[in-house]
Amino acid sequence: MDTQQQQQQQSFIQGAKVLMVGAGGIGCELLKTLALSGFQDIHIIDMDTIEVSNLNRQFLFRRSHVGQSKSKVARDAVLRFRPHINIRSYHANVKNPEFDVDFFKQFDVVLNGLDNLDARRHVNRLCLAADVPLVESGTTGFLGQVTVHVKGKTECYECQTKPAPKTYPVCTITSTPTKFVHCIVWAKDLLFAKLFGDKNQDNDLNVRANNAASSSKETEDVFERAEDEDIDQYGRKIYDHVFGYNIEAALSNEETWKNRTRPRPIYSKEVLPESLSQQNGTTQNCSATDDDSTVSAMPLLGLKNPQELWGLTQNSLVFIEALKLFFAKRKKEIGHLTFDKDDQLAVEFVTAAANIRAESFGIPLHSLFEAKGIAGNIVHAVATTNAIVAGLIVIEAIKVLKKDADKYRMTYCLEHPSRKMLLMPVEPFEPNPACYVCSKTPLVLEINTQKSKLRDLVDKIVTAKLGMNLPLIMHGASLLYEVGDDLDDIMVANYNANLEKSLSELPSPVINGSILTVEDLQQELSCKINVKHREEFDEEKEPEGMVLSGWTQSPATNGESASTSNNENEKAVDVTESSSGPEMASKKRRLSETQPENDKKETENVESDDDEIMEIENPVMVSKKKKRVE
């Protein structure tokens, strides 16, 4: 690059207005790289606060920052070494109404470092509506990828099927669990590790609220048991701390619960008898010669069936009894224990703790048998991968600013070299003509219009599958349902009444052949749904009682079966076939040429404890179907 080209590139960089969404693992690296690359005007949105578990890779944060806003602390940290640039932080949810299409229009490029599929889809739609280029990213362990999405030139983020992610951000696990697996990870990697693992290992269970008045009277040494401390009282103290005081501390952050269901603090006195000796058996009933892996709390409590669903009281009793057994029978191991799914007592403790936490957050409980199956390995975050991906994001952002479309690349960061490459750049695809988001292709909904209510359609389809936040549903000229702050009481009452009516009983009946228009005014997204009445559904295969077609790709029509995964990385990742079959890959085209029709796509869903989650294509298949860039 000659001097003139360098000056031209620098002018693009210095004149750009950039929006970053996410200030976590990738976000910290990205903000630093943007600042050091010469960007002068950067805006950051992130609703999360800093956790202890972030500190090993989110290098802009320190222990003293725990509990503070990620976006604000990241801004302050970078301004210390780049004081003359403009960085504006927003401690807020990117889905808040103030971040609308007009807000996005002011930026030259949007850079994502998000931790969930729903927010990514939301940003993708706003970028399409605002006609602003989007650079997406994700990391999982040593794997990573960066993709470029430009309206009308490349596929949008939703052009291809995104399997339900099996990765779980740390902030979700520690603060806002919504699934039972989040509770399992919390119980296994935080609570079990804190009680029975390395006592010097910091984790988020000890974090107190900033407001001392909302904190418990417990100290930072709450997990330490005094030599003369009664084991029952110690167990209750731990119980009250993690399920009671810590939940109350979390509730003090009003912003977190603005659009979430608030959890319920649970204290031992509410669910346990005053004296646990009233319960069946004691730890003395357990022989001291028992093998460590077979010591169990269940027989002492009269629990025999691992597939039985325990209630809150039973889980609480198992929690206390298992803790007592660890101290009574396995005391020498405490301090260096790690969770093992073949360790019966460890599984019982983790199951009980996860279920109590699930009860607090309104999540369905699971049996010990189910919990043991869920407790699998988690791929840990790698700071170096985040740094590499952040650098790739900035490279693509510069190309976007220069409008150098021929040089756009989707780049994959590999764990093991493929053809002597750890970074595999490939050309992006054209927009998918079957995408309902960017190509306006109608959807087809098979549903029993006489039995299914409008509420079912809203909850299971419009919200869950289409990802709309403020939906509006119309049938012809009739407005059936709407969400918004500007609705009067009569309108709200009418829409609520409609929710409880079957589709065929609505003021404008929805029957076989009806066409619904579904819009989200905030996302400026509109799509058509063709309704097809269907009497019966297979309860096992179609538990929702309805089937939506078109929001993923159509089934394969070329007679090929979906490709199977290679086994090379099965231990590190959870590999799934693409739900859309091989047609999805065969119909995609590079910007420069058409792909062979027999190409196939595989995706890997990778479990991780990192802040960024991703859907990563199998790089071996990528190299076969896309032209590599040497």
Image (cartoon, rainbow, N blue to C red):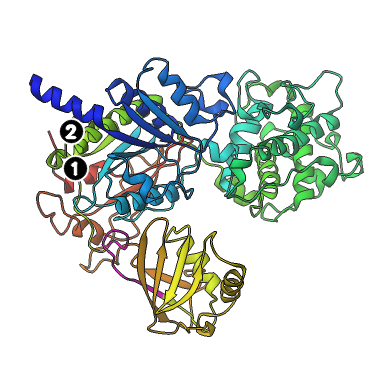
Residue 432 sits in quarter: bottom left
Residue at image point 43% right, 74% down: 474
Residue placed at 60% from the left, 45% from the top? 372
Q: Is residue 445 above or below residue 397?
A: below
Q: Which residue is mark 2?
A: 419
- N-terminal of the two: label 2 or label 1? 2
* Numbered disc 2: secondary structure: loop
Tell me which secondary structure the magenta stretch mostly adopts. Answer: loop
Q: Is residue 440 covered in magenta?
A: yes
Identify the element where label 1 is drawn: helix
- Identified by mark 1, the residue type is Ser
The magenta segment is: 435-445
Q: Which residue is mark 1?
A: 623
Q: Which mark is residue 19?
A: none
Residue that sits furthest to the top in the current view: 81
Q: CA distance from mark 2 to mark 1?
A: 9 Å
Q: Quadrant of the N terminus?
A: top left
Pick whichever, 146 or 395, lies toward us.
395
**Image-quadrant location for residue 20:** top left
Residue 608: tell me if it is visible: yes
